[in-house]
Image (tube, helix red, strand yellow):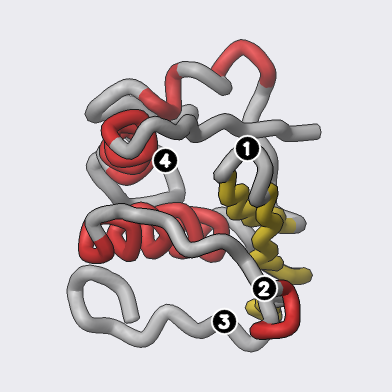
Amino acid sequence: VDKAGRPFRKREVELISTVTEEQNLPIIEADAHRCMQMLYNIVTNALKFTAQGQVVVSAFGNDEEELLTIEVSDTGIGIAPENQELVFCPFSQEDQSERRRYEGLGLGLSISREIAIKHGGSLTLESE
């Protein structure tokens, strides 16, 4: 469901979680509401920009470093190298033209990065 309450499911896009209980991920101290907000923003962003294929959510833990990594990968349109930092700026989007195809204010990734930083982490992206 998107923020307007509309179903966000796309028949052409498969949402896959590879996270299992058997992974024995580390327990972290965090604001659960804000972490869910961050995960929601990242996953719905991936779904929004993926017309067909898949969005995969994975998690990896490192007990020694007390580190939890959550990775969201997709087969979407990608982000040009020169715009990869821009998408983390409030009210910014890669396509800022008046004729852009995708809705949104450009706040999701900037809010998510701030949440990650406030929790002692980071939010980065890689795109091809």
User: Which numbered disc flags the more N-terminal residue, 1 or 2?
Assistant: 2
For mark 4, give the secondary structure. loop
Determine crowd level at label 2: few under 14, some 14-19, many 20+ residues with C-alpha closer than 10 A.
few
Residue 8 position by quadrant:
bottom left
Give the percent coordinates (x, y) of residue 112. Answer: 34, 42
Q: Amino acid at mark 1?
A: Glu
Q: Which mark is residue 24?
A: 2
For mark 1, give the secondary structure. loop
User: Which numbered disc flags the more N-terminal residue, 3 or 4?
Assistant: 3
Vertical relation: 24 (above or below) 80:
below
For the residue pair 51 and 110, the one nearer the viewer reads as: 110
Taking the image as shown, residue 97 lies to the left or right of residue 76, namely left
Q: Which mark is residue 65?
A: 1
Determine crowd level at label 1: few under 14, some 14-19, many 20+ residues with C-alpha closer than 10 A.
few
* Residue under the point 35% across and 29% down: 117
Residue 60 position by quadrant:
bottom right
User: Which numbered disc flags the more N-terminal residue, 3 or 2?
Assistant: 3
For the residue pair 42 and 86, the one nearer the viewer reads as: 42
Taking the image as shown, residue 16 lies to the left or right of residue 95, namely right
Taking the image as shown, residue 64 lies to the left or right of residue 117, namely right
Give the percent coordinates (x, y) of residue 84. Answer: 57, 22
For mark 3, give the secondary structure. loop
Q: CA distance from mark 3 to mark 4?
A: 20 Å
Q: Which residue is mark 4?
A: 100
Q: Which residue is mark 3?
A: 10
Q: Amino acid at mark 4?
A: Arg
